[in-house]
Image (cartoon, rainbow, N blue to C red):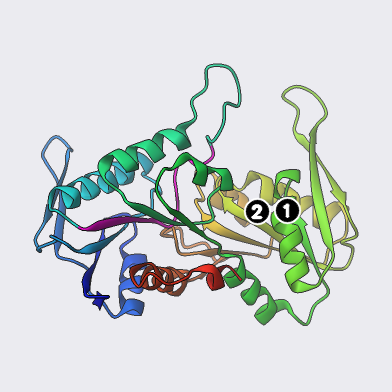
Amino acid sequence: MTTHGVDIRLLAGNANPAFAKAVSQHLGMPLADAMISRFSDGEIRVEINENMRGMDVFVLQPTCPPVNENLTELLIMIDALRRASAMRITAVVPYFGYARQDRKSHSRSPITARLIADMLEVAGADRLLCMDLHAGQIQGFFHIPVDNLYAEPLLMADVKAKYAHEELVVVSPDVGGVVRARASAKRLDVPLAIIDKRRSGPNVAEVMNVIGDVRGKTCIILDDMIDTAGTVCKAADALVQQQGAKRVVAYASHGLFSGSAIERIENAAIEEIVVTDTIPQTHGCGKIRIVSAAPLMAEAIKRVAGEESLSSLFA
């Protein structure tokens, strides 16, 4: 693939091969020939078997679990490309790990999101392309351009296709997600409800208070990521058992599902969880459904390569 006389290359790590293949197919461009393996002691070994001199290279690698291994793999691939004289290196990181540590939450705690930003820049990345950063201000940690795509249009299109005939209410799982939930409620032209989480005492389980009318309605819980699924499952139970919601469906950009998440989801009063494929899913849980973000990411790569505007992708 060539744009403005510059050859484009797409290189992928081992973190999410299915997503990389889907992006490659949407672009009509094969993945670059590279070997990513391990030395006997576990060190990562990268060999790029194509000429990258003067190329515009996109390195596709989400930093999903195992986070440290995938992050290191990404850094080494970027370093290899820089030393191979690539013209521009864009780190395509659909899921940006360590994004939750974006500020000093207590004394002597790190700001790890900033550390990762510094590591990517030192490795040689010229640009970052990601999806639904946990905190938008992380873009300010970088001295290079950052394009933060949003999965919300994809997810809301799925809501309209499947639940448009029902009486809906968008629910924010916590106060911090109100801005995101309000925007989606406006897009769907439906009411908004908020889960207010409070602890009745030290080491006492959270009490879920629901602000808004959800009785007899289909609740759409919207979040940027689901990790252990504790919050979303407790929220679903509160909505159905305490407030009389008809059903609860959760939508999230990234599905980590770590720890006991799958067990919680199976036992919770939640009918379905819909996530994108930015993180590979291998659990086989029947309640979890995938919406592909590969076409959106492929279009963004195409526009960045062609020096075109990405603003319409945020609509």
State the mark number for residue 179: 1
Secondary structure of the residue carrying numbered label 2: helix
Closer to the eye: label 1 or 2: 1
Quadrant for residue 161, please give it: bottom right
Q: Position of residue 77 (x, y in %)?
A: 22, 50
- Circles 1, 2 touching at the beta carbon (< 8 Å): no
- The numbered disc on residue 267 is 2
* Residue sitting at x 60%, y 26%: 105
Asked if the stretch drawn in magenta spans residue 92, the answer is yes
Is residue 269 in sight in this rendering?
no
**Residue range corresponding to the magenta coloring:** 87-100
Q: Is residue 278 visible?
A: yes
Eyeballing the image, is 100 above or below 239? above
Point 18% across, 38% down: residue: 42
Front residue (pair 21, 268) = 21
Cα–Cα span, label 1 and label 2: 29 Å
- The image shows residue 25, relative to residue 216, as above or below, that is below
Label 2 environment density (alpha carbons within 10 Å; few <14, some 14–19, many ≥20): few
